[in-house]
Image: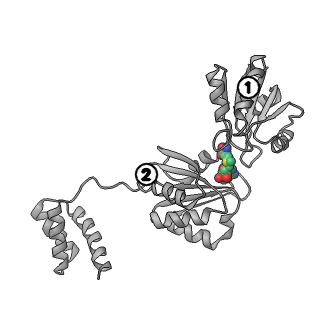
Amino acid sequence: MLEPALYIAATPIGNLQDVTDRVREALQQATLIAAEDTRHSKIFLDSIGVHGTRMLSCHDYNEAQRAEVIAAEIAQGGSVVLISDAGTPMISDPGFKLVRELCARGIKVTALPGPCAAICALCVSGLPTDKFYFYGFLPVKDKELTEVLSSFAHSCATTVFYESPRRIAHTLELMYTLYPEREAVLCRELTKAFESVYRATVSELYAQVQQDSNMQRGELVLLLAPAPKQTDEVLPPAALKALAQMLQEGMSLKGASRVLSDLLQIKSKLLYQAGLTLKSKMDFNG
Ligand code: SAM
């Protein structure tokens, strides 16, 4: 028998074998199953041998009202399992308002963890996992999309986005204008037969997506690497001016860096890097 509570249960994101024993047992024993889409979930419940349990739909727009029914069910000794169409409820899925309301009422809420596309993508990405930021779905309108993407220009953590296959090319195009050299990873159809993971720079990924229409199909998670660390060491303006002058006078970058390094006791590498930027600007301006 399940203890009276709300159970947040993660369900598979593609591979039906990714349902845990705890989730299966909870769904078998629940007095009520709250689901994002009851018709969709019935197919999954049938596949794991759960038939005939009372079900209740639970969406973003009816959660407050559903909280009343669910709270009453638990108060009478019932156990309610919340599931979404796939993965972990509340991760870009309904359930937050319901959980908040039950917590406020002092009702026990517990989790039955399992699949989540964001975590699955992060694990296979090869990008840093020590700090990560889950953004979820990106805005659809261009102005907001550009604002959001710009806000990650200096991010210090890996960022995880959910993106629609219809919009992936455009999103990568905008990212390409902002940070073409940044590492990015596109995960498609995780845990399914055609799972694929593309690891590249934003610029390469944008080119690949344009060439290969398969990359614009199925379910996608897009990950953006943290911005490269800015060097803490700032070149004094006088050193920068002297370096620019030496380069303009035709001295080699290596030579100018070495001379100024000796003269000003500044790391030659720092001068060399600043010189590369100066040179590219000089080339650009003719
Ligand atoms: N709650 C879910 C979770 O825990 O990941 C996410 C639900 S959200 C409505 C659906 C989005 O998750 C998809 O549009 C896609 O971005 C991502 N997603 C879900 N399953 C996926 C899969 N098998 N492979 C790649 N992305 C997936």
Assess disc 2: are there few (<14), some (14-19) or many (≥20) residues with their C-alpha within 10 Å of its C-alpha: some
**Image height check: is 198 above or below 27?**
below
Numbered tag placed on residue 268 in the rendering = none
Could one spot residue 231 in this view of the protein?
Answer: yes
Along the horizontal axis of the image, is 4 left or right of 149? right
Classify residue 11 by image quadrant: top right
Residue to which mark 1 is pinned: 68
Query: Closest to the observer: 121 or 99?
Result: 99
Element assignment for label 1: helix
Quick one: quadrant of the N terminus? top right
Q: Residue at x 89, y 34 (%)?
A: 51
Which one is closest to the eye, mark 1 or mark 2?
1
Classify residue 18 by image quadrant: top right
Element assignment for label 2: loop
Residue to which mark 2 is pinned: 155
Q: Amino acid at mark 2?
A: Ser
Classify residue 165 by image quadrant: bottom right
Q: Amino acid at mark 1?
A: Glu
Q: Position of residue 91 (x, y in %)?
A: 63, 42
